[in-house]
Image (cartoon, rainbow, N blue to C red):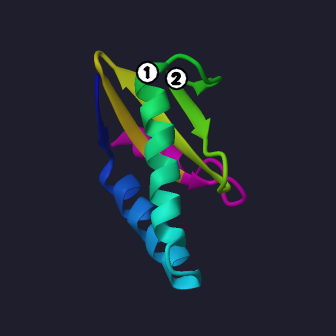
Amino acid sequence: MTYSFHPEAEAEFNHAIDYYEEREIGLGYDFAIEVHDSIQNILKFPEAWNPLGDGIRSCLTNRFPYGVIYSKVDEEIFILAIMHCHREPDYWRKRLEE
């Protein structure tokens, strides 16, 4: 199984890495590893997390307040958002219309 990012999801992922790296050297790397681990879990068990509706699911990271919002299309995971859990929870829904 493969995965890909919505362009805005990839941008917010990179922005969050930069944010954490500015706070503390190495923290951005830790964040990237945490998100990567979540994506690997999704690839292994794509149906394991509760649906948010319309075939969309969210896998939370362990250490950081982020979720990987994704859908499974055939044999690909499409990541819609790397969402901060304490901010606008449904902002990514507009990406479904694209």
How many numbered circles does the render carry?
2
Q: For this rendering, which residue is in front, 27 or 7?
A: 27
Q: Cβ–Cβ below 8 Å for labels 2 and 1?
A: no
Badge nearest the viewer, 2 or 1: 1
50 part of magenta stretch: no
Q: What residue appears at the point 43 percent right and 33 percent down from the top-left corner? A: 40
User: How far is the residue under mark 2 from the one under mark 1?
Assistant: 21 Å
Mark 1 packing: few (<14 Cα in 10 Å), some, or many (20+)? few
Q: The N terminus is located in which quarter? A: top left
Give the answer, above or below, for where 50 lies relative to 12. Answer: above
Q: What amino acid is at disc 1?
A: Lys
Q: What residue appears at the point 59 percent right and 24 percent down from the top-left corner? A: 53
Give how far across and how far down residue 80 sits, in percent: 42, 43
- Label for residue 54? 2
| Residue underneath mark 1 | 44
Q: Secondary structure at mark 1?
A: helix
In the displayed structure image, the side of residue 13 where residue 83 appears, left or right: right
Give the mark nearer the N terminus: 2 vs 1: 1
Which residue reaches farthest right? 86
- Label for residue 53? none
Q: The C terminus is located in which quarter? A: top left
Q: Secondary structure at mark 2?
A: loop
The span shown in magenta is: 83-98
Q: What residue appears at the point 52 percent right and 61 percent down from the top-left corner? A: 30
Q: Quadrant of residue 72?
A: top left
Give the answer, above or below, for where 84 lies relative to 76. Answer: below
Mark 2 packing: few (<14 Cα in 10 Å), some, or many (20+)? few
